[in-house]
Amino acid sequence: MSRQAPTLEDVAREAGVSRATVSRVVNGVRNVDPAIQDLVRRAIERTGYAPNQAARQLVTRRTTTVALVVSGAGDASDTEQNAFATRVFADPFFGRVVGGVVAHLRPRGMHPVLMFAETPEARQEVVAYLRQGGADGALVVSTHPDDPLPALLAGAGLPAVLFARPGRPVPLSYVDLAHRDGGRLAAEHLLELGCRRIATVAGPLAVAASQERLAGFRDTLARHGHPYVPVAEGGFTVDSGMAAMTSLLAEHPDTDGVFTANDLMAQGAVQVLRDHGRRVPQDVAVVGFDDSSVAVTCRPRLTTVRQPVEEMAAAMARLLDDHIKGARSEPTSVIFDPELVVRDSA
Amino acid sequence: MSRQAPTLEDVAREAGVSRATVSRVVNGVRNVDPAIQDLVRRAIERTGYAPNQAARQLVTRRTTTVALVVSGAGDASDTEQNAFATRVFADPFFGRVVGGVVAHLRPRGMHPVLMFAETPEARQEVVAYLRQGGADGALVVSTHPDDPLPALLAGAGLPAVLFARPGRPVPLSYVDLAHRDGGRLAAEHLLELGCRRIATVAGPLAVAASQERLAGFRDTLARHGHPYVPVAEGGFTVDSGMAAMTSLLAEHPDTDGVFTANDLMAQGAVQVLRDHGRRVPQDVAVVGFDDSSVAVTCRPRLTTVRQPVEEMAAAMARLLDDHIKGARSEPTSVIFDPELVVRDSA
DNA sequence: ACGGCGGCGGAGAGCGCTCTACCACCCGCC
DNA sequence: GGCGGGTGGTAGAGCGCTCTCCGCCGCCGT
């Protein structure tokens, strides 16, 4: 490599024009004589010029990045910090979020910088990073309903968009799913299948989404003559799904249909069901939620309520873009519709 | 928020000192009178000052980020681009890499910007991004042995560190695992368990790591009087593990021990084994590789060869740091030792 | 008492880019 | 042939920071 990166100045000299002209060519603005454009482009080629982002950012006050923040609540101890990232990405859900976000960002030459905000310090860091202009805005995925980060961001007047409606109202845009409809879809399917003894493994009830999935599920069953539905609460993990299913089975051994609030728990439930000699779907039908990658990799493949995570993530990025550009100032919410995907488990 | 972010100048005025002094306090350099330090700090507090990263980067020629690149090879079509991220993160392996990288970066105030390089254009983008000073260096995780990105990076003289030795020699540092020893560990364990009809599901043989795991496994068995070992090639996915195990079982129904080159395939193998009426580990012992999250979530929990991915990722970040700082100029490689983790499957 | 030196703080020159003036044309027109 | 209105280009003022000088002051040694 050469000792010193070429600058606009160098290219200008090489091409025999002014700095401003080169800048115009590089940014594709205004009327520059095609012949000169060519001249400049050739000079850029020859010098191997690459515009300096820092200099550009300094004057435009725009970076080419947004923060993609995975946020928790409370104050995980230091030793847990490392594990947080690992744990978070163990859920296939986040991979889909990343995919959706990148799909929107990439064509715009933008990139996500990954941040974790599971401790008060980490949260401050995120805010500081944005305030220093490290990124133009934040895409926040909270793992906990009481996450204080959204309020922090809103308070600092920083552009941010959330995945899922925040626990308590915050003047920030967000995308979400019509969870209630998702619960309804699951109930209707189980009913159509002829299940009569239906139970459910709910998500953490502190999470609004869990409550709504459950509400939609229950309401629908109630409307069809099933006022009472056994419920066990899980934590969105395989293990918690196993535990929940075990207790459900102990109290209601004649269960013939189960709705679990996500696919990971469905996997655990299926496991337990089989260990107890039940065949899925013949003896017990199981409907999951999310349509994550495990839904197709596990056996039997899961019938599940699809959450269009990629599209939701892309919409999140789009909203953030609007806020950054100033094209949108009022907080907005975009709600997506779930969809039933029928496979083998129900 | 105020209309205009306060600058060093503002703080200096507020504190009644010069810009330089404030800068010194902010960066904690040189000897500044404690009394003045306090004065300045108070002024910072009052003004709500946050240093502008772009301006700082412009003069220091340092960003606070490194690129974390997940790289493929070939030219995935546009429609596949989105899926790439999703697919990649579906493997729990990457979550661990992220965790390890962040563990090293965070205490240094650095952040990873996520990039995907699965097409020629995307690769050019990564190179361009680095050349423009968007990040100080790159951490590259390739999913394919013929990945051209490392050579591109090396050719451009950009600081970069790879996860795993590149397919063909490239003057870049990398971290890797003693895969051969991993294969040996698996073989020894199966032997100790008393298995006599041992088979293996290898990873894609185009990948060096797969070859070495296989070689270490075979050599060890050969040394213990098992010169012939049935091998089926898989693709590191659950499905491919199922397919491989199915064909293995068809030709060698008396198999009593299996080593699979990763945990995902082990999961598939266990699945198939059970479907064929074999009990794991009683009838057939299964040893996986990686010690990924599925190893503990699946049933039975997997006995597996642990790859210390988090530590390897942290080492990768450390090496990159050294290269960026100029503390290290020659390409270096750091090889980690695998470790057998005994659980329920063998 | 005086020269020198070390600790502290200030002045000011950039870093490489964008962008707003502003100027030099050349065209067609009356 | 002079004059308005485009074009097509240049000049230069920053953006907010770091960092090298440099100068001031007080203290020491001789």
Image: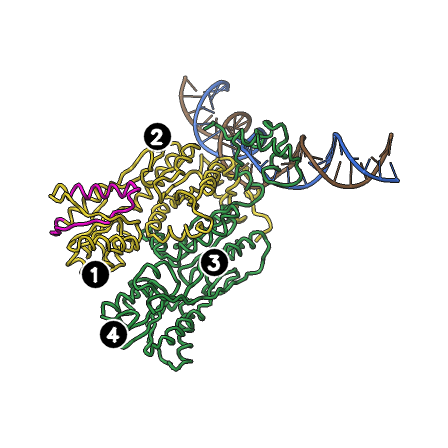
Chain colours: A green, B yellow, C blue, D brown
Amino acid under disc 2? Glu
Residue A69 falls left or right of residue B180? right
Q: Answer yes or no: do the residues labelled 2 and 4 have beta carbons within 8 Å?
A: no
Question: Please, what secondary structure does the residue beneath circle 3 have?
Answer: helix
Q: Are marks 2 and 4 on the same chain?
A: no
Quick check: B300 above or below B330?
below
Nearer the N terminus, badge 3 or badge 4?
Answer: 4
Q: Is residue A244 magenta?
A: no
| Residue designated by label 4 | A250
In terms of depth relative to the viewer, which is nearer, A163 or B5? Answer: A163
| Residue designated by label 2 | B330
Amino acid under disc 3? Glu
| Residue designated by label 1 | B276
Mark 4 is surrounded, within 10 Å at the Cα level, by few (under 14), some (14 to 19) or many (20 or more) other residues, namely few
Q: Is residue B215 magenta?
A: yes
Q: Which quadrant would residue D11 be assigned to in this image?
A: top right
**CA separation, marks 4 and 1?**
29 Å
Mark 2 is surrounded, within 10 Å at the Cα level, by few (under 14), some (14 to 19) or many (20 or more) other residues, namely few
Q: Is residue B42 visible?
A: no
| Residue designated by label 3 | A311
Q: Please provide percent x and percent y for residue A185.
A: 42, 71
Q: Residue at x 31, y 61 (%)?
A: A298
In terms of depth relative to the viewer, which is nearer, B172 or B212? Answer: B212
Q: Which residues are magenta?
A: B191-220
